[in-house]
Amino acid sequence: MTLPQEAIVRQFLLLLLVAFCVGCGANQPPQVDPNDSVMVLAQKNYDTYCAHCHGIAGGGQPDGTGPGTHEFTRSRGYHVVPKHDSSSDTWQHPDQLLFETIKFGTHSPLNLYVMSPYGETLDDDAIWGLIAYMKLFWTPQQREHQANLTRQFAEIRDDWEEYNLDIYLTPTAETPSS
Ligand code: HEC
């Protein structure tokens, strides 16, 4: 059974439109209040220093096979850049760990892709601004859950400001080279 040509074309255009809308919705950066100078600056900082790796809306590296995509990166033995959006697990980390990750950088010993430290480029206020901005990528429930994690972490580690995760973040002289 064949559909009339016109109907096929109409269905195709509709599919294209749906695919486009799904795609564009996921890639929109969050709206910030133009009068909120902290968030305006945070968005600018995120777009300048983070978006080229983590995605303008926290979507991480794009899927697909071209340069910069998951497959391309994996095929060279590197870990892909994680997402920060509601489909990721960034919201499962308390503020304190996000702060330290951004300030000191991170490099899990299990993968081959280092994130540089931003403590020299961005002051602490700017880093807190980035964290507040990244929360706009999450659902209200995720934000609430993450706020609880942050409170719990503060209770357990009230000295967290001196608590430096450097030992996990920077390969040291003691790290075996092979
Ligand atoms: C050169 C690419 C690159 C840039 C630029 C970059 N990151 Fe990353 N980021 C990574 C990679 C790769 C990881 C994962 C490292 C690992 O797991 O060892 C990561 C991890 C993170 C994590 C931990 C995520 C999680 O859910 O555990 C946070 C938070 C983060 N980055 C925030 C930022 C922010 C904020 C900026 C901008 C100031 C930024 N990153 C810039 C590559 C980048």
Image (tube, rainbow, N blue to C red):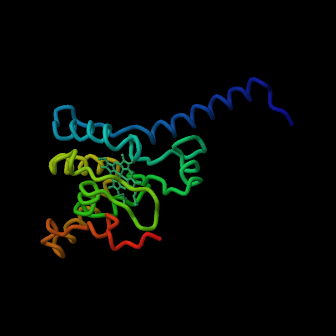
In the rendered image of this protein, does residue 147 appear above or below residue 119? Answer: below
The image quadrant that residue 162 belongs to is bottom left
Q: In the orientation shown, which residue stands out farthest toward the top? A: 6
The image quadrant that residue 89 belongs to is bottom left
In the rendered image of this protein, does residue 155 appear above or below residue 52? Answer: below
In the rendered image of this protein, does residue 69 appear above or below residue 13? Answer: below
Report the side of 54 relative to 167 (left or right).
right
Which residue corresponds to the image point at 26% horizontal and 67% vertical from the top-left? 165
Coordinates of residue 71 in the picture (x, y in percent)? 58, 50
Coordinates of residue 138 in the picture (x, y in percent)? 34, 52
Q: Nearer the viewer, residue 152 or 121?
A: 121
Q: Nearer the viewer, residue 3 or 16?
A: 16
Which residue corresponds to the image point at 44% horizontal and 52% vertical from the top-left? 81
Q: In the orientation shown, which residue stands out farthest toward the bottom? A: 156
Report the side of 4 relative to 131 (left or right).
right
Report the side of 26 relative to 72 (left or right).
left
Coordinates of residue 100 in the picture (x, y in percent)? 24, 60
Report the side of 157 relative to 50 (left or right).
left
**Which part of the image, by quadrant, shows the N terminus?**
top right
Count all numbered tags in the image, as a single digit. 0
Which residue corresponds to the image point at 53% horizontal and 50% vertical from the top-left? 73
Q: Nearer the viewer, residue 172 or 90?
A: 172
The image quadrant that residue 160 belongs to is bottom left
Which residue corresponds to the image point at 71% horizontal and 26% vertical from the top-left? 9
Coordinates of residue 146 in the picture (x, y in percent)? 28, 62
